[in-house]
Image (spheres, rainbow, N blue to C red):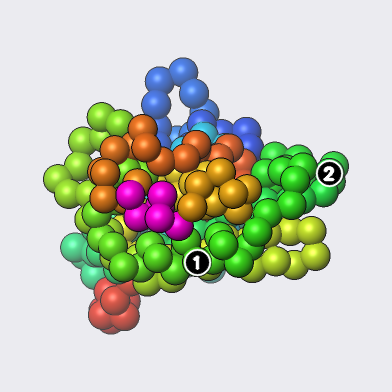
Amino acid sequence: MRYFVELSYNGTSYHGWQKQPNAITIQEVLESSLSTLLSSKTEVFGAGRTDAGVHAKQIIAHFNHEASLDADRLVYKLNAILPAEIAVKKISRVHENAHARFDAISRSYEYIVTLSKDPFKIKRAYYIKKDLDINLMNKGAKLLLNYTNFKCFSKSKTDVKTYNCTITEAKWERKEDVLIFSISANRFLRNMVRAIVGTLIEIGENKLSIDDLIRIIKSEDRGEAGYSVPAHGLYLTKVQYPITIYSI
């Protein structure tokens, strides 16, 4: 039987989602906890591979178990043994072939920028000392929806079949001294959101123009785009699936 587990985490102390040698990751910790509670080795497959320091307000993973589970009780037990930085919200039975990564139809991220020094946002938001032109940044964000090839924002030497992504939302909002960038797409390339944010910030600083952004996208060259902002301001906020996955 296959189950989806919905969880959130503060990624500050973790080397991202995916298991790797000599580093503590979210996937490793979740697999270990599930294996302990289910008394059998349990592999977990996530909806995405967040980098070291990136947070998730919502991420979905799937795992298999041969017996029917009391989902609510398992949520309670998992939260009792998982570290404080990781919280399980829900476990749901899904179709046997449902896949947390490949069946996702939309993913959403937020990037948080603080314009004032705030000790409570350390490792939770990116501090920029100067003010930014949010109107220009929103013009650049809106322009992204006109394109599909985002190779210029992808990490170099990334092994993917296509650099095409369909962005359905990209916008900046200001709440007092905090800027929030929201973006949704059917898929994202590695480092894509952080590179987009860095490029839009350079537009907000008047270091780049809207015409420069068009040139950068058409160049398909990562070296032409802006810098990658730090990971600690990035949050995976939502992963969506077809409703039919849950119809069993």
* Residue at (56% x, 44% y) in the render: 207
Amino acid at circle 1? Lys
Q: At x 74% / y 52%, what residue is drawn?
A: 131
- Looking at this view, name the residue that lies furthest to the top: 22
Residue for point 45% across, 50% down: 196
Task: Name the element at disc 1.
Answer: helix
How many numbered discs sit on the rendered protein?
Answer: 2
Estimate the spatial distance between the alpha carbons at disc 1 and disc 2, rounded to whole Å: 27 Å
Three-letter code, disc 2: Lys
Residue 221 is left or right of residue 13, and the answer is left
In the picture, the disc for residue 139 is: 1
Say whether residue 101 is magenta: no
| Label annotation for residue 117 | 2
Residue neighbourhood size for the residue with mark 1, other residues' Cα within 10 Å, grouped as few (<14), some (14–19), many (≥20):
some
Residue in the foreground of this view, choosing between 58 and 73: 58
- Location of residue 246 in the rendering, given as x and y in whole percent from the top left corner: 32, 76
Q: Earlier in the sequence, mark 1 or mark 2?
A: 2
Range of magenta residues: 210-215
